[in-house]
Image: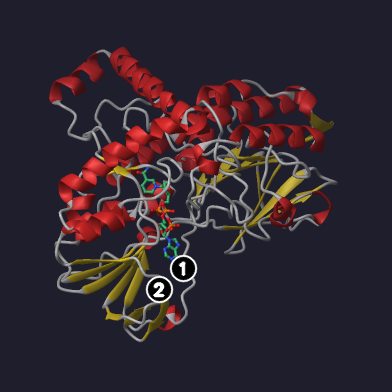
Amino acid sequence: MSATNASTEKTSILIIGTGFSGLCMGVQLKKAGIEDFVLLERGDDVGGTWRDNHYPGAACDVPSTLYSFSFEPNPEWSRSFPTQPELFEYQRHVARKYGLTPHVRLKADVQECRYDEATKRWTVTAKDGRVFEGSVVVSGMGGLSNPSYPNIPGLDQFEGESFHSATWNHDFDLRGKRVAVIGTGASAIQFVPQIVGKVSELHYFQRTPPWVLPKADGPVRGWEKSMFRALPFTQKIYRACVYGLRECYVLGFTTFPKVMAAVEWLAKAHIHRHVKDPVKRQQLTPNYRAGCKRVLLSNDYYQAVARPNVNLVTDGIQEVRGKRVVTKDGTEREVDAIIFGTGFKIQELAPKGTFIGTAGRDLADVWQSGVEAYRGTTISGFPNLFMMVGPNTGVGHTSIIYVIESQARYVVDAIKTMRDQKLGSVDVRPEVLKQYNDKVQSMLVGTVWNNGGCKSWYLSENGRNNTLWPTFTFRFRSQLKSFDQASYQVKR
Ligand code: NAP
């Protein structure tokens, strides 16, 4: 049943999210001459993850020249690795420059997308009751949108201040406070060095230490910017070199995991250089193969953890009692604030009740038996639904924007094919989906992500890797070159 009513906004293509995925889709549709689309954004501005994650020190660990759209090079990046404010501004610039702003509907927090087999259209309902209808839905919700909190008894009754890295409370003055930080991942290693000099005590709860390498970061020099401005092809060449170099890392992750021993050696030297306390050194040294979890980059992390006001706690947390965090060994630590650097609900690409396909099936239920999509983009039983950064499209070594651009090209070609051939719906054949995923999973066997001796969010609870792309990203791009209609059941 469609929820269509008089106030329903009808269009052709509904894009969910205005992060890099949503923006890229919008730009590519415009470039293809398609104007009848709407971008639904739950926030009050465009930008997605890079709008929300404004914690101190938030930055990207992929070089700026590669972490940007190929069609919109930016000669003005201030640093080799972009910071959150610059990335957010870049996204706003893209929205303005490519005329996307009139297509954006802000504060449209999507609650349900329901497919109607009779009309072959999707009805999308926002939490505030607004209803949108279109024949195609492109989900650009991404995996890093919903913060994940640890399940610790008593946490909901904590008597101090608490917030997540993705919902940072800048109004809370950390100066002189006793603070607990839970989690030691990509976000925590960026904000801990920023707050350690302000707080009186930092109790840093580490479950698994990450491998951290020095970051080849620095300001982009004036002459480099001038060159990129005057001779844009030089930035293109630089970008291609960065891309090519980073693709070589794939060999270490997939084919020659022993090469990662060199990464471990470098990271250990990094610890040795900055951490003099032998106990902390040992606590900070991972015992799994580098690459099994994302390899992190920082020039100030180990110096921060080495400071005397940092108490690195490796005992598990048992409960929170009043203002005290109690570890399994019975130690109680009183704190004024808890900051969660505990990541995102990455396995929740389709929260229950969000995508209802043919025969009223919920994508969350379909994915109970395994999260999978064809070419990371389409799912059987969910016609005309395209998922950006879907299952097995993640990358740990290069820019996700490369993946996003590859998918956008495929989706635009699918939409053009549907229009040219007057197709009402395209639904990937189940046998094609299965064959594709069997291949992806077989390629992941033996990789450092599946066999590196760690437990990471790359793997689901049953140990299946439905997060990462298993090989070079140019192979991903090549399979998404054009829409392969034969792989789909089509209805006119
Ligand atoms: P994350 O890398 O998933 O790290 C989460 C941390 O929280 C881990 O140390 C994890 O420990 C810990 N943790 C989770 N649940 C816990 C629990 N119940 N009790 C104790 N510890 C717990 O999360 P993130 O740092 O927010 O980063 C998420 C992703 O965002 C990254 O992997 C990356 O893709 C992206 N990111 C990218 C950049 C960038 O520079 N491009 C920057 C920030 C974030 P375990 O390791 O033991 O699970």
Q: How is the image coloured?
A: secondary structure
Q: Which quadrant of the frame does ligand 1 lie within?
A: bottom left
- The residue labelled by disc 1 is 150
Seen in the picture, residue 367 relative to 62 is either above or below; the reply is below
Give percent across and percent down for residue 316: 40, 70
Residue type at the position of mark 1: Pro
Q: Decide if residue 205 is on the left or right side of residue 288.
A: left
Give percent across and percent down for residue 438: 71, 35
Which residue is rendered at x = 81% and y = 35% of the image?
431
Report the disc number at residue 318: none
Q: Is mark 1 within 8 Å of ligand 1?
A: yes
Give percent across and percent down for residue 157: 42, 84
Q: Is mark 2 within 8 Å of ligand 1?
A: yes
Quarter in which the C terminus is drawn: top right
Give percent across and percent down for residue 192: 25, 58
Residue 452 at least partly seen: yes
Asked if the residue at tag 1 contacts the one at tag 2, i.e. Cβ–Cβ closer than 8 Å, the answer is yes
